[in-house]
Amino acid sequence: MKIAVASGKGGTGKTTLAVNLALAANESVCLLDCDVEAPNAHLFLKGEMKSQRVVTLPVPVVDESRCDGCGLCSQFCAFNAIVSFGTFPVIAPEMCHGCGGCMRVCPQKAIHEIDRRIGVVETLQSGAITLVQGRLDIGVALAPPLIRAVKESLIGNLLIMDAPPGTSCPVIATLRDVDFVLLVTEPTPFGLNDLRLAMDVVRELGLPFGVVINRAGDADEYVRPYLEEERISLLAEIPDDRRIAQAYAKGLSLVDTLPEYRPLFTNLLRQIREAA
Amino acid sequence: MKIAFSTIGKDLSAPMDLRFGRAVNYLIYDTATKTVLAIKNDYADAGQGAGIKAAETILKAGASVLVTGDCGPKAFNVLKQANVKIYSAKNVSVSEALAAFETKSLPEITTA
């Protein structure tokens, strides 16, 4: 069972939800932090580093003695990472997506690939939770290949993924092939706007999903009425409780610090298992 | 010698475009024939790599000098590898920038 926790807007509570779902599961869980540009689940799980591996992407190198400057590589590249102006092409490796197309179209076989480091995948153990996180190197813009590397670590039966915010490529890379998407939002106009964007993505991918409102209060003019009107399942509401923010600020987990919230997460997990 | 200018218009009277990679058009001025060729920038809205493609565009047009507002690091690299000299001209028309270039009063861009 693969559950992804996502949201359009950042800072709605993806990590809080993912970490506490994992802690409330009462079985061995693999938690994948797919927010490789800013992994933060490790802040709430004091664990021991078990392994670390470097992730690379193949990028082209041109053999000047073979290149005749035909420019086919440049015409082919959809990412403008290789340019040719009648001479030896210039490559911008930081823009290359590693598709290998330039190498294939080169009639002179003048292009070969070398590995370019983009980040690391780290595995930590914290009790029953195996935390796998990606850490993109500073200056690297391409998150999806590293996210795919994080997702190769499929350990055990229950997999919870903490997705990056937004609706772009890193989110798609995370959500692909999951069984259920939990969309977290907050009861604000911004929260609703970005929830709708995230729902568009999840529907386009054809994935079952449910919504959790975080920092919920009585005066929700935005999200709750919208969900009722659209008949979208509201799976849980985490109340706007100052003590939750205090625990979060100290890097403490919710289910251990405020045990009265544990049933909220166990129920949520049960509902997801029934829905997926 | 051919000089490339980034511009928002299509002739010498048009204002310079401060952007290189995202410029609307490029004007290629041939000092030998005193003729002008306007090239539309097909990569002005590219998701990435507009600067690199802009460098490719003016190089294919045969320019050995570029006059623009600012030039980013990736385009700068490509242009330096092709030995193009880059000069900065802002808030003037292309013809004014050309006149300033001819009197050697344009500052050269030497770092990106």
Image (spheres, rainbow, N blue to C red):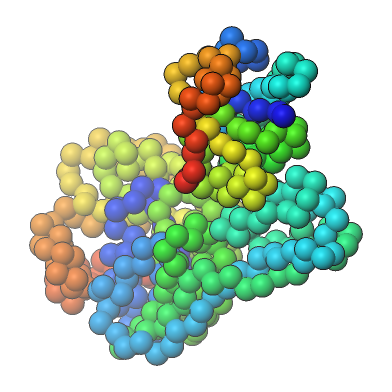
The answer to whether B50 appears left or right of A13 in the picture is: right
Residue located 15% across and 60% down the image: A245
B79 vs A154: above or below: above
Quarter residue B56 falls in: top right
Q: Would residue B94 be found to the left or right of residue A5 on screen?
A: right
Q: Position of residue B39 (x, y in %)?
A: 71, 24
Left or right placement of residue A44 versus residue A143 in this view: left
Q: Residue furthest right?
A: A107
Q: Is A80 above or below relative to A120?
A: above
**In the rendered image, which quarter is residue B47 located in?**
top right
* Front-most of residues A276 and A147: A147
Could one spot residue A199 in this view of the protein? no
Q: Residue at x 26, y 53 (%)?
A: A214
Closest to the observer, B107 or A116? B107
Residue drawn at (30%, 53%), measured in percent from left and top? A12
Horizontal and vertical percent position of residue A45: 27, 78
**Residue toward you, A238 or B3:** B3
**Vertical comparison of A122 with A71: above or below:** below
- Residue extending furthest toward the front: B103
Q: Residue at x 36, y 67 (%)?
A: A39
Res. A10 visible in picture = yes
In this rendered view, identify the residue nearer to me: A117 or A217.
Answer: A117
Q: State left or right for residue A240 relative to residue A81.
A: left
Where does residue A34 sit, x and y in percent of width and height?
44, 66
The count of marks equals 0
Residue A17 position in % (x across, y down): 31, 64
